[in-house]
Amino acid sequence: MKLKTVYITALIFSIMIPSAFADTVSTEIDSTTYDIVYTGNNVVLKSATADLDFISLIFETEVSGSDGDVSITFQRDFFDAKLGYSDDDFFILSDGDEIQFAEVKTDESRTLSFSLSAGTEEIEIIGTILANNSFLIEQEQQAQDSAAQAQADVEAAAQAQADAEAAAQAQADAEAAAQAQAQADADAKNAEEEKLDKLMNACGDGTIYENGECVLSPMGKNASDMRTGPLIYSIVIGMSIGIVIMMILWGIGKKSHKVLSDDDS
């Protein structure tokens, strides 16, 4: 009889005193499913959704009866709140209102415990790192990218300046080379003209410098032709007269020989 009374009393107390239980709720991030362990007293976490834009987890809740309590454990490699290498505080909203919580930390996990009022439908827990996604890491990466872009822009501007200076120097060198070549050509032309002047002045009267030597000028040639013409004519006339005289003498001689021949006969 006493045993039965104790059993009934225990059953009544188990019904009257809210029971705490451990359970899990799952969420999927980038095609990977993560199980979140929690202990609820009059609280059930019906679902969990990740918001990667705000690095938060949103839980759909059901609070039975009066107020309830819940403790949620997050593995640090899944969900954490850090600034650099130091721990930061999580931020918890209950139906949009901030609530207070207690926390227990280890090197591997962080457990958040808090109370929820009856009728609470949603809680959101905000951190800084969620499944390798981090707003701070993104900010740091963006800062690194911005710094890298700024450095690239500086290097590009410096390279452009160096290219412009090199092009200007090359243009100046080309112009200087062209001027030097033009001066050299002018000097060579002047030297050649001076040389020709000296050679032409070195030729005697009636000669000119032509094809690398002194030759008679056209006027000198004409004068030479005029001086030798009468002499040639005189020689030709004299030879013609001589031939005529010889022919006459030969004819006279031949006639005299014929007369003598007739007389002897």
Image: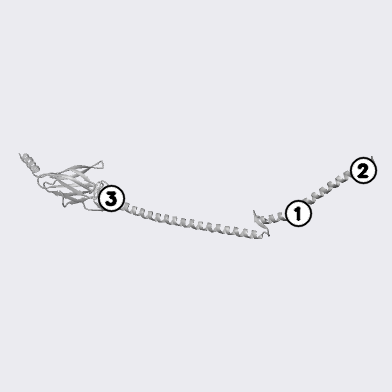
Q: Would residue 67 appear left or right of 24 to someone viewing this image? A: left
Q: Residue at x 82, y 50 (%)?
A: 242
The crowd level at tag 1 (other Cα within 10 Å; few <14, some 14-19, many 20+) is: few
The mark nearer the N terminus, 3 or 1, is: 3
Closer mark to the observer between disc 3 and disc 1: 1
Mark-to-mark CA distance, 2 and 3: 155 Å
Residue 194 in percent (x, y) is at 61, 60
Q: Name the kind of residue labelled 1 in the image.
A: Leu
Mark-to-mark CA distance, 1 and 2: 43 Å
Residue at label 3? 138
Residue at label 2? 260
Closer mark to the observer between disc 2 and disc 3: 2
The crowd level at tag 2 (other Cα within 10 Å; few <14, some 14-19, many 20+) is: few
Describe the colour scheme in one phrase: one colour
Residue 212 in percent (x, y) is at 65, 54
Q: Name the kind of residue labelled 3 in the image.
A: Glu
* Residue 231 tag number: 1
* Image quadrant assignment for residue 3: top left
Q: Residue at x 92, y 41 (%)?
A: 262
- The N terminus: image quadrant: top left
Residue 72 in percent (x, y) is at 19, 47
- The C terminus: image quadrant: top right
In this view, the residue in front, 202 or 98, is 202
Closer mark to the observer between disc 1 and disc 2: 2
The mark nearer the N terminus, 2 or 3, is: 3
